[in-house]
Amino acid sequence: MKAYGQAPRNTARNLGNTLERREQIRLGVRALVKFEWFDGQGASHREQGFTRDISSKGLFIISDSLPPPKVDLQVDVSFESISGVEPNLELSAKALVIRLEPATTPGASGGFAVLNRSYSLANQASILDTEGDSRNEPN
């Protein structure tokens, strides 16, 4: 699947005073995220937050609760429709926490970056997986 706004691979872009080396364009999207991980004793931890940005390679999540670094997560992102009806698109990903950014001021939320290991996009009628295949869900 080629995403809208996707940059060519292995390119560097000059963004003013910084040089962007990411392979994928990040889209500034605020959406509800629910995430879950298991600790060393096997206990499940379920939290939620909001996306700050998303790309096909991963996302950045803002949350009051930060998972441990290098932990595997199940991430579910709900995108609401513009008309305000129930969410009709969901991103589900298996991801790895690659960076933590603790809150820098009292009362602020921290955040963390994840790398997608696999993901799927789903709506009420079909599922679109990372290979770009569209399949109808059973009714």
Image (tube, rainbow, N blue to C red):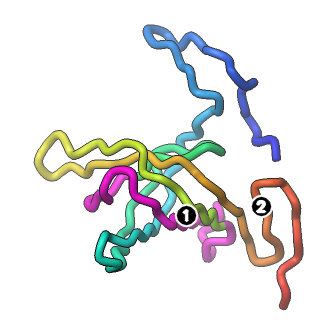
Q: Is residue 105 above or below residue 139?
A: above
| Mark number displayed over residue 4 | none
Q: Which residues are magenta?
A: 62-89
The residue at 82%/47% (across/down) is 1
Q: Which mark is residue 129?
A: 2
Q: Nearer the viewer, residue 119 or 72?
A: 72
Residue placed farthest to the front in the image? 41
Residue 26 location in percent, x, y? Answer: 58, 36
Tell me which corner region of the image, top left, top right, bottom left or bottom right, holds residue 27.
top right
Q: Magenta stretch mostly in which secondary structure? A: loop
- Left or right: residue 86 compared with residue 121: left
Specify whether 2 is left or right of 78: right
* C-beta proximity under 8 Å, tags 1 and 2: no
* Kind of residue at disc 1: Val
Q: Residues within 10 Å of mark 1 (few under 14, many from 20)?
A: many
Disc number lying in front (1 or 2) = 2
Sequence-first disc among 1 and 2 = 1
Q: Which residue is mark 1?
A: 77
Kind of residue indicated by mark 2:
Asp
Q: Label 1's element?
A: strand
Expressed as whole percent of the image width and height from the top left, the position of residue 76 reads 54, 67
Quadrant for residue 55, please give it. top right
Residue at 32% from the left image edge and 79% from the top image edge? 43
Tell me, yes or no, whether the highlighted magenta stretch contains residue 79: yes
List x then y, in percent, for residue 35. 44, 67
Where is 138 relative to 18, above or below?
Answer: below
What is the C-alpha distance between the residues marked 1 and 2?
A: 15 Å
